[in-house]
Image: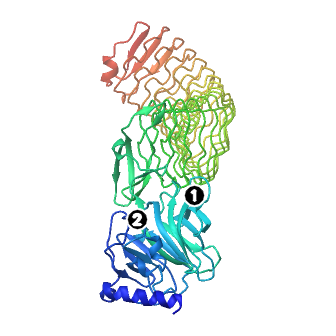
């Protein structure tokens, strides 16, 4: 009787004893893949069989009775069983072709529905050579991503195959040319971690894969080094699909954590490292991050001693606050393509001198380099970025601004206090918010053109003490709160659009300003508008729309004559406070309800003129240089 036929006869005999004819393929759901000896189990399937959370898959079979995947007595699957009987191969085993006749081209072991990942430690494997060779290829996948692989494993020859930490070692104990059976124990190195599928093919392209396996060994809780991990060192949580590390409880020795970061917990991958090492001030060297991680939000928050950043896994999308407060960090890691959120990533990393390249996937760069005082050169901003609020706030070493792409919408406080910046970048038309954008940029001498879509210019150039020229204000602007406050070198003001309503502090402390702009009828608030403008000698006409004139001309020491105050103004507290050159008539409208200290700090003769019906003016206690005239 030929060899193949003898195997079929033996298998039919054993299967009839085990009663496989009455069994159906079944699925025993498990939270993690269980180690498998297959003993006491007798099952069959066609091209797929699920057992204890593991799916075994092959091809070319036609039915589950004679030609399918089968679990049965291992002596049914190996004629050389007697010489191979060992702790690893005994009792029952699993084969991918019951009849050894359908020439399957692959054999695959995966977690059921790819619902969880695992670390494969070892398995016993026998290959039957039908003439296409007994060298095999082994590949480990996480979804569609190839994680580890070895090619050309000779099942008849002991040895270590592959390189690095992704090797496979064979201890050969079946090497029968007569029976064409070759096999032994395959042991997988630490790189075979965080995978959901093992796929085996013939090294002879298209050759058959007749597999018999036993003693599958998995690790349930695995670190990045491929070894068991002590979960008592970690705080973690799960949503049922993956785990999040929310804290490290172990000690820091010589700047390092104990052991390694868990890559798999209870068979599920680690996906998020939220707050994991927050406030670990003694940590100087970051541990390896598992490849499965996608969220690194707050991972090393306030690790002030951190000097070396880890390699960031390719799948990471969220790096918000990742290194926030890591003041000792001097070099940024490479940011992988796919990251979308870099908000606060390097917040207050004062030791950082060079920015990393920004991937095209990034959308949020708010606060990214906030307070990075050592940064001297800005990175190129990718075309996907939309939010650049506070991006370079306080980067005092920055001398040149990057080009702003037309994808950006928010530039609030982008260059606030970048005192070394001498030239502003072009602001694209996509930008809708420029509040505080150049506030405190004392080296800036010329303002950029402002896009027409801007409506709010609060604090945009506040504190730009070197600014000598103002930009054209777009027609749609409605608020100019402190827009040019403290721009002491500014000698002339821009035209104010007709829609502006708020001009409080607009030119406060513009000591070089000698002529005020025309105030449009839309303006309501002129509180502190020209506060401290010592060079101003003539006040503008005040429109009828204004209601608040508190502190409007306070400390305008060059102002000699007050403007006409329209009916409708309510607050005139401190309007002319400290105007030492002011003299002549000042008419107080009946609408005013607050005159607190309106003339305090004045010294020249002033006539305060008001109607007899104005009770507030009548009750006002004027200083000695002010004469009250009621009509």
Decide which of tag 2 and tag 1 comes sooner along the chain.
Answer: 2
Give the distance between the C-alpha atoms of the residues marked 2 and 1, in whole angstroms: 23 Å
Q: Residue furthest bottom?
A: 1
Q: Residue furthest front?
A: 83
Which label sits on residue 110? none
Q: Residue furthest top?
A: 624
Q: Is residue 118 left or right of residue 137?
A: left
- In x, y percent, where is residue 391? 56, 39
Q: Residue at x 53, y 25 (%)?
A: 508
Which of pointers 2 and 1 indicates the residue nearer the eye? 2
Residue 334 against residue 49 in the figure, above or below? above
Q: Residue at x 68, y 28 (%)?
A: 468
Badge 1 density bin: few <14, some 14–19, many ≥20, Cα 10 Å: some
- In x, y percent, where is residue 223? 45, 49
Residue 62 shows in the view: yes
Mark 2–mark 1 contact, CB under 8 Å? no
SS class of the residue under badge 1? loop
- In x, y percent, where is residue 219? 41, 57
Q: Give the residue at mark 2.
A: 87
Badge 2 density bin: few <14, some 14–19, many ≥20, Cα 10 Å: few
Mark count: 2
Q: Nearer the viewer, residue 383 or 216?
A: 216
Residue 64 shows in the view: no
Look at the image and tell me in which quarter the C terminus lies. top left
Q: Give the residue at mark 1.
A: 167
Q: Nearer the viewer, residue 70 or 541?
A: 70
Residue 392 against residue 575 in the figure, above or below? below
Q: In this figure, which colouring scheme has been used for the structure?
A: rainbow
- In x, y percent, where is residue 267? 38, 59
Q: Is residue 401 left or right of residue 587?
A: right
SS class of the residue under badge 2? loop
Q: Is residue 514 left or right of residue 33?
A: right
């Amino acid at each position: 009787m030929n060899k193949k036929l003898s195997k079929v006869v033996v298998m039919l005999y054993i299967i009839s004893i085990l009663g496989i004819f009455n069994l159906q393929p079944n699925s025993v759901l498990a939270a993690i893949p269980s180690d498998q000896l297959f003993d006491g189990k007798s099952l069959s399937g066609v091209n797929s069989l699920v057992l204890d959370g593991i799916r075994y898959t092959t091809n070319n079979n036609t039915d589950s009775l004679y030609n399918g995947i089968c679990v049965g007595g291992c002596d049914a699957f190996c004629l050389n069983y007697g010489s191979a009987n060992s702790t690893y191969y005994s009792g029952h085993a699993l084969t991918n072709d019951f009849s050894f006749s359908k020439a399957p081209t692959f054999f695959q072991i995966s977690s059921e529905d790819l619902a969880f990942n695992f670390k494969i430690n070892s398995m016993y494997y026998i290959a039957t050579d039908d003439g296409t060779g007994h060298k095999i290829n082994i590949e480990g996948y996480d979804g569609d991503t190839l994680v580890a692989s070895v090619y050309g494993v000779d099942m008849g020859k002991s040895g270590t195959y592959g390189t690095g930490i992704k090797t496979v070692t064979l201890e050969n104990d079946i090497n029968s040319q007569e029976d064409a059976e070759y096999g032994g124990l395959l042991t997988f190195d630490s790189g075979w971690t965080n995978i959901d599928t093992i796929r085996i093919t013939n090294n002879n392209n298209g050759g058959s894969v007749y597999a018999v396996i036993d003693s599958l060994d998995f690790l349930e809780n695995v670190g990045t080094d491929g070894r068991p991990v002590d979960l008592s060192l970690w705080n973690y949580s799960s949503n049922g699909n993956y785990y999040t590390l929310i804290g490290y409880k172990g000690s820091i020795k010589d700047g390092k954590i104990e052991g390694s970061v868990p890559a798999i917990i209870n068979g599920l991958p680690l996906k998020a490292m939220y707050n994991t090492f927050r406030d670990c001030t003694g940590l100087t060297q970051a541990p390896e991050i598992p490849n499965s991680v996608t969220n690194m939000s707050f991972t090393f928050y306030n690790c002030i001693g951190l000097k070396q950043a880890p390699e960031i896994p390719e799948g990471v999308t969220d790096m918000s606050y990742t290194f926030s407060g890591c003041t000792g960090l001097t070099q940024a890691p490479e940011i992988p393509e796919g990251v979308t959120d870099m908000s606060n990533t390097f917040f207050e990393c004062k030791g950082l001198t060079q920015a990393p390249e920004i991937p095209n996937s990034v959308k949020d760069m708010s606060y990214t380099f906030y307070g990075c005082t050592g940064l001297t050169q800005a990175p190129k901003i990718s075309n996907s970025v939309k939010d650049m609020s506070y991006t370079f706030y306080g980067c005092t070493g920055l001398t040149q601004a990057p080009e702003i792409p037309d994808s950006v919408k928010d530039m609030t406080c982008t260059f606030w206090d970048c005192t070394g910046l001498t030239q502003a970048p072009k602001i694209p038309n996509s930008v809708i918010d420029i509040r505080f954008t150049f506030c405190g940029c004392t080296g800036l001498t010329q303002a950029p053109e402002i896009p027409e879509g801007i409506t709010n210019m609060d604090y945009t150039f506040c504190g730009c003490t070197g600014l000598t020229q103002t930009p054209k204000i777009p027609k749609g602007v409605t608020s100019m709160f402190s827009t040019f406050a403290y721009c002491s070198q500014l000698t002339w003001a821009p035209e104010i659009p007709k829609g502006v309503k708020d001009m409080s502090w607009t030119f406060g402390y513009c000591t070089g300003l000698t002529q005020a702009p025309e105030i449009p009828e839309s303006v309501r608030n002129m509180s502190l508008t020209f506060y401290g403008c010592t060079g101003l000698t003539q006040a503008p006409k005040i429109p009828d729309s204004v209601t608040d004139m508190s502190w409007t001309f306070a400390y305008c020491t060059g102002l000699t004559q007050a403007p006409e105050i329209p009916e409708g103004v309510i607050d005139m507290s401190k309007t002319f406070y400290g105007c030492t050159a002011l003299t002549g008539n000042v008419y107080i409208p009946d609408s005013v309800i607050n005159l607190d200290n309106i003339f305090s700090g004045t010294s020249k003769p002033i006539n305060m003129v008001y109607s007899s019906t104005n009770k507030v003016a009548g009750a006002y206690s004027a200083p000695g240089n002010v004469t009250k005239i009621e009509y």
